[in-house]
Amino acid sequence: MRDCLKIIGAASALALYSVPAAAVSPATQATATARVFRPLTIQFQQNLDFGNLVLSGGVFAGQVISMDQAGVLTGCGSNVTCSGAPAPARYKLIGTNNAIVTITCPGFNLTGPGTLAFTPNAPATVNLGANGSTTGVIFGIGGSITLASTTPDGTYTGTFQVTADYQ
């Protein structure tokens, strides 16, 4: 009798666990998304040029000359006279319409008769807009250098390392 009760108990337990549950669905189903972009290109358009920077005859240090992304210079005055035709670096981006592109441009040194640390002033992002795949977007990069009365005169040059990537 005990063996019979054990078998009946085991069969009952097995029956309880093998009954399939009713299927359920969430209140909201997930969706799938894929963002497809055309290849992104970045093209050089123009070099950055601070113009002519003439040091005064006085003693000074830490005179920051800055150029914004549109090419406007600041920091000129009694210690440094600025002339010529300053211009920002310019690049053209072509890619997917209305895409947001992240711009990266690390600092570097201008070298010549001495060394000048260059700190870029680049946009963090660029929106390619409605014509991103055809005419693209042109953006500027300015930057700043620091001069002193002891800065050696001459021509200083350096090379940008600009990268662009879809956000």
Image (cartoon, grey):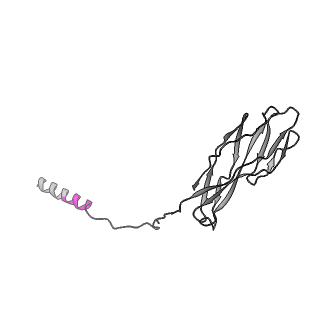
User: Above or below — where is 83 with respect to 133?
Assistant: above
Task: State the quadrant of the N terminus.
Answer: bottom left
Q: Main secondary structure of the magenta part?
A: helix
Above or below 6: residue 62: above
* Depth check, front residue: 84 or 12: 84
Q: Does 146 sit left or right of 17 as displayed?
A: right
* Relative to 128, 25 lies left or right: left
Q: Position of residue 61 (x, y in %)?
A: 81, 33
Q: Is residue 20 magenta?
A: yes
Q: Position of residue 138 (x, y in %)?
A: 67, 59
Residue 101 appears in which quarter of the rendering?
bottom right
Q: Residue at x 65, y 52 (%)?
A: 124
Rendered location of residue 17, percent (x, y): 26, 59
**Magenta stretch?**
11-21
Q: Is residue 150 magenta?
A: no
Q: Quadrant of residue 132?
A: bottom right
**Residue 74: image location, x then y, percent:** 81, 47
Against 61, residue 35 (above or below) is below
Residue at horizontal 70%, vertical 43%?
119
